Image (tube, rainbow, N blue to C red):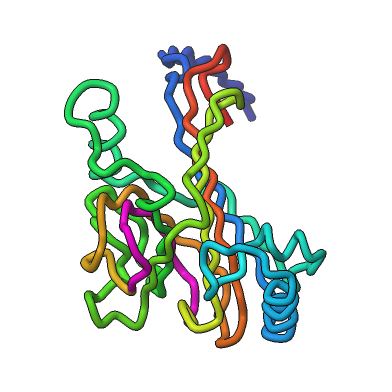
């Protein structure tokens, strides 16, 4: 009877590169919801107070807050957005090239919502649920005011906010995006403008009589000492 022992050693060399720096674009999508009873009460109170309103058909979140009417639900979906090709063309044109026309403003900015769950893609030029001038699966709403730019934050942000009144966008909210449209409509094809971004975000189904507000906060990151901005 014999005994035998064997052994081996292996040396492996792996080459790795350090993490790459990158500039991040991140969007948070915030939705607040008021039911039909709250909407009716708020509309009556605002009428009694004779407060000037930009859009009589839609009560803004700021107006609900002024009346101390809390939403029945709020949801925040973080990092759920893509700047599309036309959006990047507009951004880079503002640095060196053809400036976007018209620029986003109090009269040229909308948030659109739609029913499609198709993944966001760089080449998209409107919401996937936007089927044209007779679309029943998308709606673009003028923003409640000019988009706000916060350059003092880290990173800087661009914020859009819109209030969807009782008679519009009454379907399942599965996607969102912004464009430079000039009037409320069901489609980017009608009174549209540069389509800037698109995100997929399941927010539930808006019912007739309810008021929902949508806020997009887009942050533009830059390389930091650790290589990322969150």
Residue at image position (40%, 45%) is 105
Residue 76 lies, in percent from the top left, at 64, 56
Q: Is residue 213 left or right of residue 51?
A: left
In which quadrant is the N terminus drawn?
top right
The answer to if 198 sits in the magenta stretch is: no
Q: Position of residue 51 (x, y in %)?
A: 67, 65
Residue 225 to residue 169: above or below? above
User: 115 left or right of 155?
Assistant: left
Placement of the C terminus among the 4 image quadrants: top right
Q: Whole-percent x and y of residue 81?
A: 44, 49
Residue most toward the front?
50
Identify which residue, 15 or 146, lies in the foreground.
Answer: 146
Specify the quadrant of the image occupied by residue 25: top left
Q: Which residues are magenta?
A: 171-185
- Compared to residue 45, the image places residue 94 above or below, namely above
Q: In front: 60, or 160?
A: 60
Q: Report the residue at 52% width, 44% height from top.
A: 159
Give the x, y percent position of residue 19. 47, 19
State whether residue 163 is above or below residue 169. above
Which of 143/97 is in front? 143
């Amino acid at each position: 009877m014999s005994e035998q022992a064997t052994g081996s050693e292996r040396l492996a060399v792996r080459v790795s590169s350090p993490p790459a720096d990158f500039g991040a674009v991140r969007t948070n999508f915030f939705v607040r919801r008021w039911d039909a009873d709250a909407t009716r009460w708020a509309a009556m109170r605002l009428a009694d107070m004779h407060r000037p309103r930009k859009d009589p058909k839609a009560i803004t979140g700021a107006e609900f807050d002024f009346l101390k009417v809390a939403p029945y639900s709020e949801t925040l979906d973080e990092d759920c957005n893509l700047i599309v090709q036309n959006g990047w063309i507009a951004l880079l044109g503002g640095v060196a090239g053809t400036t976007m026309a018209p620029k986003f403003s109090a009269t040229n900015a909308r948030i659109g919502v739609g029913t499609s769950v198709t993944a966001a893609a760089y080449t998209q030029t409107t919401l996937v649920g936007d089927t044209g001038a007779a679309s029943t699966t998308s709606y673009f709403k003028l923003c409640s005011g000019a988009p706000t730019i916060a350059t003092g934050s880290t990173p800087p942000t661009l914020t859009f906010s819109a209030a969807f009144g009782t008679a519009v966008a009454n379907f399942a909210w599965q996607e969102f995006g912004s464009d430079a449209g000039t009037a409320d409509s069901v489609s980017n094809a009608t009174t549209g403008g540069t389509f800037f971004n698109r995100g997929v975000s399941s927010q539930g189904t808006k019912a007739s009589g309810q008021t929902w507000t949508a806020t997009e906060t887009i942050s533009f990151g830059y390389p930091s000492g650790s290589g990322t901005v969150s």
